[in-house]
Image (cartoon, helix red, strand yellow):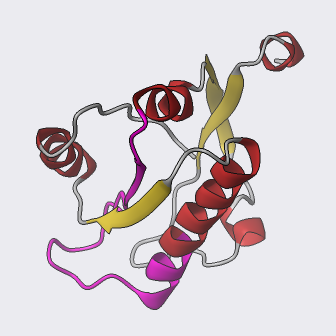
Amino acid sequence: MNDHADAGLRVLAVAVRPLPTRAPVPAEREEAERDLCLLGLVARTDPPRAQAARRDLPLRLAHVWNWHPRQNVGEPVTAAQRHQAARVLRQASERIRAVAPNVRPYDERLPGPATAALLRAAEESELLVPAPS
């Protein structure tokens, strides 16, 4: 993992934790990250920022919520879910502004499911690079 990070790659951990039926999604990071099962690591370059700067385009950050498997279709998003999405987007925008002041990020929360939301976003975008924050 350190070799990837030293090479300038973003290293992401992918993990899961089953939640009991109808359990609320944890609002706090510490609670959400408790008792996770690591599935693996993903190393990737960070092209969205570079592409936006190269093309002098704003960088669109989209958060698509992957609903809890037992959350009914059409069930309203909780305040905790909205807060978490806003926090993720705000932190990503701050990181981009800190390392690439010439890039203009803007963010939005898109209704899921994720695949359909990203396909809609792709239709509206000149360049779409799915990337976690």
Q: Which residue is most to the bottom?
A: 79
Left or right: residue 115 versus residue 84 is left
Q: Please count the marks in the image.
A: 0
Q: Nearer the viewer, residue 100 or 82?
A: 100
Identified at 22% across, 55% down, the residue is: 113
In the displayed structure, would residue 20 be above or below residue 117?
A: below
Q: Residue 91 location, x and y as percent?
A: 66, 62
Q: Residue 42 location, x and y as percent?
A: 61, 22
Image quadrant holding the N terminus, namely top right
In the displayed structure, would residue 111 be above or below residue 102?
A: below
Q: Nearer the viewer, residue 22 or 92?
A: 92
Left or right: residue 118 versus residue 36 is left
In the displayed structure, would residue 133 be above or below residue 7?
A: below
Q: Residue 128 location, x and y as percent?
A: 30, 33
Is there any visible trace of residue 24 in the rendered image? no
Magenta segment includes 90: no
Identified at 35% across, 67% down, the residue is: 109
Left or right: residue 113 versus residue 37 is left
Q: Residue 93 location, x and y as percent?
A: 59, 58
Identified at 28% across, 31% down, the residue is: 127
Read off the magenta span: 56-84
Is there any visible trace of residue 108 in the rendered image? yes
